[in-house]
Image (tube, grey):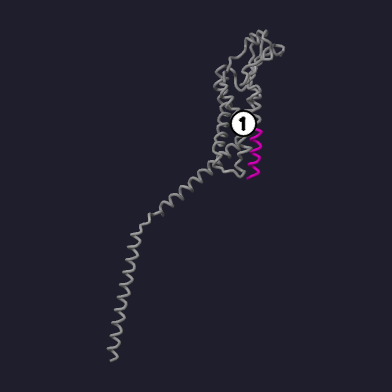
Amino acid sequence: MTSIIKKFRVLFIIGLMLLFTSLFLEWYILQAFNAKKILIAYWSFNPLTEWSTRFSETAAFNNLIKPNDLHIPIIIIVLFILLLVCSLYSVIFKNFEEKIEIEKLTFYAYILIFLLTLNLYFIFLFPILYLIPNELYFPFLLIKDRELNVTFYYAIGPGYLLQIVGFILIFPYSLFYYKTVFKFKSEKGSSESIIANLMQRIRHPIDLDELIAKEKLKLKLNDKNLADLDDVNKNFTEMMEQEVM
């Protein structure tokens, strides 16, 4: 089991690296080719730089087909980078396999789950909220415009693909980390509550007067029993003496 966890942790670190690298690659690409299959327009999208092109500003056709800016909030990108850094810190220095109090890892468990959630945002909501409304076909499409005699090619880029691969790599360890921390926390909490309830049930206030009264009653009963036993022995002795006479 330990070897499997170590493999998941290695895959997790690789996944973090891929997710970080994806921020500097193209997430979406739009290209146009003429009848001679020569590239005459090129636009690529990156969440940090928005749309960029390899053509100059004087390329009229290239500027004409430029897509609308998608306006992904920069705060989301910054948050994503912070989550990547915190996740790397947690997997290296806050590893639950080491001798660390697991109940102190709750914050880092939430970090990993939040990273997964934001990663899913890029994978699913990026095309739904940004690409499709701007008529950018997903995941890829080849369109031939016979009037312009131009072929348009729409496709997701390597950055977006790394988002998918990165999610697959970080998912097992993130889920295992989260489940381990909160399972330990719930079991410890339940055991502590059970012990507290038992202690409360057996904990009674000590009443000295009540204890003294009980002890006196026991002594009286013992004295009475002894007196009754003496009377029985005395009567038995008298009866034996009368029979002998």
Residue linked to disc 1: 85
Magenta stretch: dominant secondary structure:
helix
Residue 141 shows up from this direction: no
Residue 163 visible, this angle: yes
Which residue shows up at 55% across the image and 32% down it? 114
In the image: residue 45, left or right of residue 204: right
Is 70 or 80 nearer to us in this picture? Answer: 80
Query: Which residues fall within the magenta stretch?
Result: 1-14
Kind of residue at badge 1: Val
At 57% from the left and 37% from the top, the residue drawn is 175
Could you tell me how many numbered marks the image carries? 1
244 versus 141 height, above or below:
below
**x, y percentage for residue 47?**
61, 21
In which quarter of the view is residue 217 placed?
Answer: bottom left
Residue 72 counted in the magenta span: no
Q: Quadrant of the N terminus?
A: top right
